[in-house]
Structures are given as C-alpha cells and as structure tokens.
Image: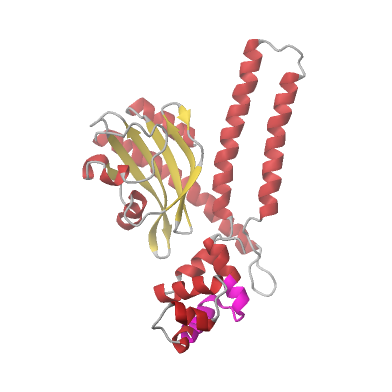
Amino acid sequence: MYDYARVVMTKIAPVDAFYVGLIHAGTKVRFPYSYDGTQHDDSDTHTIGRDGLTAWLLLNKRTYRFDLDGGVLLNGGVSFGDVRRRSADAVTVPLISGTLEGPQVFGMVSMQSYESGVYNGEAVAAFEWIAEVIGRVLSREQEDRDALTQLKLGTDGTLDSDFLTSDQMVEYLVEQVGEVRRGAEQALDEGSPTLDRACAALADVRVACLRIQAELVEMTLLVDDRPTLRFKTLTPAEQTIAVLLADGLSNQAIAEQLRPTSINTVKTHLKNIAAKYGMSRRAEIAADVIKHLGKLP
C-alpha cells in the first residue's frame, strides 16, 4: 500500500522523498516506510518534539504545505536520507481516524521535492485523497483488532491482554529471517547460478528485508503502551515525584531533592499517583514508571 501511494504520486508530481509515520502512545512517531529518491531509508523511531511538525499536525489536524512557513517546521525536525540536501517543497497530510472524542491524528504521510513550487492544488488534492485511503485502511485494521478484543471478554467481564509480548516479536523475527535464509540457500544450492538468477535472488532478499523492517516497526504499535498512558495522567509535579520514586528514592529523599517541598506534600502526591494508577504497592508503581521511561530496572 505504501509503495503504491508513493509510485502513484511520482506520476503526478516530482517526489524526491516520501515517508509514512505512525504515532505511538502520543509520545513517539514510528516510521515504517521512508524513501529518499529511489533509496529506501531504514525504519526509525523519534520522540515527538514540542514545536515540531508532528506537534503541529496533532494540534491543527490539517495538511501542512511548505509555503505555509517556508519549510521552518519541516526542516526543524529530524532529517533522513541525504542530509546534505534540504527539501524545497513538501506536503504532509495527517492520517485521521474518527473517535468518540472526535477526529484524532494517528499518523502522517509526506512527500517532498528538491524543486520549489512543484506541488500545486491538484497535486495536494490527489495526495490528500491517497492519504485518506491509507488512513481508512489502517483505521479499519485497528477497528478489527478492537472487535476481536471485545470477543475475548472473559466471564468476569475483564479483557484479555491484546498486546504483543517479546516472545511473539522474537518468534515473528525468527520465522521471517528463516524464510529469507532459505531463499538464499536455495539460490546457492543451484551450484553455479547465472548472473540474472543471482541478481533475482538478491532482489528477493532486498524486498523481504524491507518488508520485515516495516512490519517490525508497525508491530511495535501493538506493544503495551499502558505505562505511558498512565504516566500522562499525572500532573507535572506528580510526574517528577514518580520519576524519583522509580529511581529508588525514599519519601524523605524525594522531599530533600525537591526542597522546599515537605514530606507531607510528597506523601499526598504519592497517594494521588497510586489512585490514578490503580496500584497500592510502591514497588509496583515504580516498575510501571520504569517501563514508561524505558529504563533497565
């Protein structure tokens, strides 16, 4: 689908760079698919900046065009591909899904060019239509996952976990790499393959690797993000204390670290944190915060 969108747009307007980004837990953007010219760039993940393009899309929920600010937002973010060159025109369209709270941005699709002024109204309209189709497909996939989760309702009314585990990720990776290896072995077993056959085998390996990279990044969207969601419910003061708690500090040590905050104030904040987390044990809360921070225990 991503390949199709990129190739179609190259028939309409110059496309020197292209990427798809998907938002994870409101704090990160995962890029399963990005191209610079004809070169595929490795999948990557970045934290959402406060004043960057992703933050602008989340706030405005509309298409960003280079001429809006002369590329300030675009060029202020993390570069990819050939970092020696800057895009002179760009269109980035948010991927939007409908929720009970209203439209929600869950990702974006961007096309860029080294030529200025190449994206006219017709090109932008076509790109917005393609982005809408991509958004609809991805949203429907999420709706299907949610529906399957509802079918897993236990007799006690609780939901089974629908998040991926590390074991499942490893199993997937082992299986996919195994298929690539078997394809390479088959080509080698032919004895002395022709140059065309060797090139074809390498092309198959390349396509398989690109697919695995993209799928692994998208699978991370299904990893348990509840620790991050819980942390985001805390006030700034509570977040500071939660981080110190995760560092193993006692109530007295936290109060001393945050002078002139009193130990009674620290206890009040910890009580509020426990209520929001639905946890009573100090170690349990600390472990959950550590998961959000991505720190080794």
Q: Residue furthest bottom?
A: 264
Q: Can see residue 226?
A: no
Q: Position of residue 182 (x, y in %)?
A: 73, 29
- Which of the two residues, 89 or 98, is positioned nearer the viewer here? 89
The image's colour scheme reads secondary structure
Q: Is residue 110 left or right of residue 157?
A: left
Identify the residue at image location x=51%, y=80%: 253
Quadrant housing residue 233: bottom left
Against 92, is 245 above or below? below
- Does residue 189 sit above or below 263 in this rendering? above
Q: Give the residue drawn at x 61%, y 63%.
A: 150
Our reading of the magenta stretch's main secondary structure is helix
Is residue 203 on the magenta stretch? no
Q: Is residue 72 left or right of residue 271?
A: left
The quarter of the picture where residue 213 lies is top right
Find residue 220 and report its horizontal and vertical position in percent: 56, 51
State the image coordinates of residue 95 (x, y, percent, origin top left). 40, 48
Q: Position of residue 294 (x, y in %)?
A: 55, 59
Q: Where does the magenta region start and end?
A: 267-286
The number of numbered discs placed on residues in the rendered structure image is 0
The answer to whether residue 19 is seen in the rendering is yes
Q: Is residue 120 above or below residue 203?
A: below
- Name the quadrant of the C terminus: bottom right
Q: Is residue 125 left or right of residue 46?
A: left
Residue 288 figure quarter: bottom right
Question: Which residue sits at x=32%, y=57%?
Answer: 59
Q: Residue at x 70, y 12 (%)?
A: 193
